[in-house]
Image (spheres, helix red, strand yellow):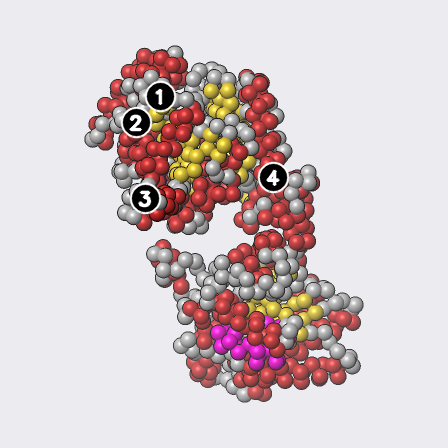
Amino acid sequence: MTKKIVKSTSKTKEHKYIYSFGGGKAEGKAGMKNLLGGKGANLAEMVNIGLPVPAGFTITTEVCTAYYKNNKKYPKELTRQVESSLIKVEKNMGMEFGNKNNPLLVSVRSGARSSMPGMMDTVLNVGLNDITREGLIKKTKNPRFVYDSQRRLIQMYADVVMEKAAGIDPAEGKGVRQQLERELSALIKKKKVKSETELSAGDLKELIIIYKKKVKEVLGKPFPEDAKDQLWGAISAVFQSWNGKRAVSYRKIENIPDSWGTAVSVQSMVFGNMGDTSATGVAFTRNPATGENHFYGEWLSNAQGEDVVAGIRTPNPINEVGKSEYTKHLVSLEKAMPKVYKDLNNFQQKLEKHYHDMLDIEFTIQEGKLYMLQCRIGKRNGPAAVKMALDMYKEKRIKKEDVVIRVSPSQLDELLHPIIDPKAEKMAKVIGKGLPAGPGGGTGRVVFNSADATEWTKKGETVIFVREETNPEDINGMRAAEAILTGRGGMTSHAALVARGWGKCCIVGAGNINIDVHTKTIIGSDGSKIKEGDWITLNGSKGNVYKGQLPMIKTDEKNKDFNAFMKICDEVRILKIRTNADTPEDAIKARAFGAEGIGLFRTEHMFYGKNSEKPLFLLRKMIVSKTEKERRLALDELYPFVKEDIKATLDAMNGLPVTFRTLDPPLHEFVPKNPAECAKLAKSLKISENDFNARAEILHENNPMMGHRGVRLGITYPEITEMQVKAIFEATIELIKAKKKPFPEIMIPVTCIDTELKHQYKLIQKVYDEVCKKFKVKEIPHLIGTMIEIPRAALTADKIAEYAQFFSFGTNDLTQMTYGFSRDDIGAFLPEYLEKKILPIDPFQQIDRDSVGELMKIACEKGRSIRKNIEIGICGEHGGEPNSIEFCHLLAFDYVSCSPFRVPIARLAAAQAAVHFPKKNYCHKKINN
Ligand code: PEP
Ligand code: MG
C-alpha cells in the first residue's frame, strides 16, 4: 500500500516539459507565453477558440534553459515525454511518424516569449525519407509534391541542423543552402524551365539524389534517413538557434534577456505545395504599415511555409482592397479561392475580436482546406501603431489605458521621423520602385553586405543597405543602416518585418532594378548605374528609390493622430513633464511639444553659442576679478544680459514654472586660452597681461568636477548669486506688471550639506526684500530649492528640506558620484563593460534603481518627512528615458524634465507608468523590478 502511494506521488511529480494541442483541445493557453513561447501559447489559444489547427505539442522554454545550463543535455524525462506526445499527435491525425505506409510528417519550429521574426530556425517535413516517401506517394497519388517536400527537407535540414547547429561558419556563398540552391538553378536551366514549380516529379527525384550527394560532399556526412534521428536533430537545432549569431544580435538590440530561452513546437505538417488548390500565406488583421482597418496579406499558391517570408518569390495580394500599383496585376486569394478566403476572413475577425489587437497570422491551404498555423500580435510601425490604437478606441474595443500601452516610446519617436523634402522629391528622378515596407525617408551611401554596413556606419557614414533578397543573417547591417532596400520579397518578408519593428525606412521587392551584390552595382530602371559608396535616397512610405542625396526634413508635431494620441496620454498620466531649456527659442519649441514648464534652465548656457560674445566677455571679466569691488563692477555690467534672457524665457513659458539654476560650472571653464582674448580682457580690467595670466593660473583645477563649482561659487562669491536672483525677481516683477504670469523657481546646484543651502537661502531672502522694497510690491511668486546630485545631499535630505521648497534630482552628477565614474570619461571603458556584461545597462542612460535609485528613494522619504508636499522632480538626462520615468512615477515625483525633443516620449512613458502602476503613493511597491 505504502509503496503504491510513493510510486504514484513520484509519478505525479514528474515535471511537465510538454504541452499538447489538437483535436479541439489544448493543454496550454495564450497567457502561457513565458513557458510555451509566443508561438506555442497562441497555437493552443487558437485551438481553444475552435480554429482548425493541425495537432502538435510544445516543448517548454524551461527545457531550453536546462539544456544550456546542463552542458547541452536534456532533462531525462524529455525523451519519454516526446514519445508519448508524438503518439497523441499520431492518434489525432490518424497517421504514424516514420510509418512506411501512412507516414506523419512534422514541422519543428522555434518560439520565444517575445517574437524574434526569422532570427531562429525552423525545419519542415521532418520524417520524410526514401521509404516513407513511397507511402506518401501511394496515399496522395501526388509524387511531384512528395519529391518536392523531400528536397525541401534536405535543403533546410542540411542548412539548419547539419551546418548552423553544428557551428560551421562557411564563407559567403559557400554555405550548404546556397550550394544546393545553385544545384536547383542548374537543374532549372538544364530542363529549360522558368522556375522550380515547372520541374516534373522525375526532375525533383533526380534533384534529391544530387542534393544528397552534395550534402555529403560539403558537410562530410550523409543526410540522416531515420525519422526519429531527424526529429531529435531538428529539436536540438532549434534550441541551438537560440544562441545562433542572428538571435544573439537581435536580443542585444531588442534587450531580450538571454535567460528566456525558446520553446520548440512540433506540429503535424499540412501542405501548401500539393498543387494549385494548395497555398500558403501570411496576413495581418489590419495593414501594419499604415494602420488602415482592412485585412491585409500575401499568399503563394503551390508553395510551402517559408516561401512567402523568405522573399524568394514575390507573393500575391490576399484580397482586392490590399492591391497596390505594383501588385494590381496579380490574382488575389479572394478571387482565386473565394470560399477559403471567406473562412480566412471570418477567422481573422474572430481572432481580432478575441485578442483585441492587430494580429499577424500564418495559414496553409491543403487541397482547398484551410489550416491556421500561427498567430501573434503583429509588429507595426509607429504611425500604424498610433492609428490602430486610436481606431480600436473609437470602435470601443479598447480602453484609454490600452491605447497608451499599445504604442512604445520608440514607435512614437517614428512619428517624428524625417521625410524627404517634398519639393526636392518632386524634381528627383525615380530609378526604382518597390514595396513601401518601412516609413519615412532615408538617404545614404550604398553598401551591399552586412559587415560593410556596420563598419561604414562605425566610421560615421550613413549607409543604405542593399540586398538582392532579404536574409535574417544580415541583422547587424540592417540595424546599422539608415535604410534598407531589397530587390525581392514582399511586405511580410523578414526585412520588412524587422524594419517595421524598428520603424526603419525600408523598401522591399524593388523588382525593376537590378541588384548585383557580387559586382556591387545597381542598375536602375532607367539604366543608371549605382556603385558601392554612391548616394541614393529612399522613400519608404511610397516605395520610391532616387539617385543621389535628397534633403530631408523632420516631420512636425502637428500630425492629427499624433495630437489625439498625446491627448489621451495626458489624460492618463500623473507626472507632469517639463523640459530642460536654456534659451527662449528652446522654451517655445518645448512648449509646442507639450512641456508644462522648464525643469532646468542652465544659466551658463547664455555664455555659449549665438549672441554670447558680449556676456561671455563680461563673465570672464568677473571671473578674473581679484577683489569683490572689481567683481561687482563686472557683475553690474553682466546683469542686463542675464535679466533679458531670464525675462524672455519666463515670458515664453507664461503661466508655467521655470526653474533657474544658479551658475554651476567650474569657473576655469570660461577662462580664455587665446592670447588675443586674454590681452583684450587684461586691458579692460586695466591690468598687465602677466597679471592676467597669473590670475587665470590660480583658477586651474585638477579635478574640476569636484572642484569650485555650483553652490560653492555662490558661497565664496555671494555677489554672483545675488546678481542672478536679482535678475530673476526683477524680470518677474516686470512681467507681472505687463499682465503676464511668470513663475520662477530658484535652484541651487551641487549642494552637499544643509548649511550651504541655509547660507544661500538667507542671501536670496535679502535680495528678495530689497527688490520688493524697490518695486513697492508685497510679494513676488517664487520657490527656492536645490538639486540633489551628491550622495551626501540625498542621505541628509531631511536637513536640506528645512531650506528647500523643492528638490530636483541631478542624476547625471548623482550617477557620476555614486559610481565614481567620470561622466566625461566613461567612453574609455563603458562599451567594454556593457559588452562583457559587467554592467547590465549604461547607468548614465537609465537610472540604476539599486544604487542611484535607492539614494533617490531615501531623499524623497527624508525630504517628505520634513516638508510633506515638497515639490520633487528630476532634471538629469534620465528624465527623458522611459524606464527612469517609470521609476520617478513610482516615487510619486511631481515632474520629470527632459530635452524638448524627448517631451512627447516622456508624456507617453509617464502615461504608461500610470497604467502599469495606477495608484498614488505606490512608493515602495515594485520599485526594484
Ligand atoms: C545633473 O547633474 O544631472 C544635472 C542636471 O546637471 P548638469 O548636467 O548640468 O551637471
Ligand atoms: Mg549636475
- The first of marks 4 and 2 along the sequence is 2
Q: Residue furthest front?
A: 1
Helix, strand or loop at mark 3? loop
- The first of marks 4 and 1 along the sequence is 1
* Residue 106 visible to the viewer: yes
What amino acid is at disc 1?
Pro
Q: Residues within 10 Å of mark 4 (few under 14, many from 20)?
A: some
Q: Nearer the viewer, residue 438 or 482?
A: 438
- Residue at screen point 47% across, 63% down: 848
In the rendered image, which residue does mark 1 sit on? Answer: 103
Quadrant of res 245:
top left
What amino acid is at disc 3?
Pro
Q: Which mark, by number, is residue 356? A: 4
- Residue at screen point 61% across, 73% down: 864
User: Horizontal placement of 335 versus 483: left or right?
Assistant: right
Q: Which mark, by number, is residue 75? A: 3
- The first of marks 3 and 4 along the sequence is 3
Q: Residues within 10 Å of mark 1 (few under 14, many from 20)?
A: many
- The first of marks 2 and 1 along the sequence is 1
What amino acid is at disc 2?
Ala
Whole-number angstrom distance, CA of label 2 to CA of label 1: 10 Å
Q: Residues within 10 Å of mark 2 (few under 14, many from 20)?
A: many
Q: Do the numbered discs 2 and 1 sit on residues whose CB atoms are within 8 Å?
A: yes
Highlighted magenta segment, given as a residue range: 786-807
Helix, strand or loop at mark 2? helix
What amino acid is at disc 4?
His
In the rendered image, which residue does mark 2 sit on? Answer: 227
In this rendering, the answer to whether 865 lies above or below 452 is below
Find out whether residue 792 is within the magenta segment.
yes
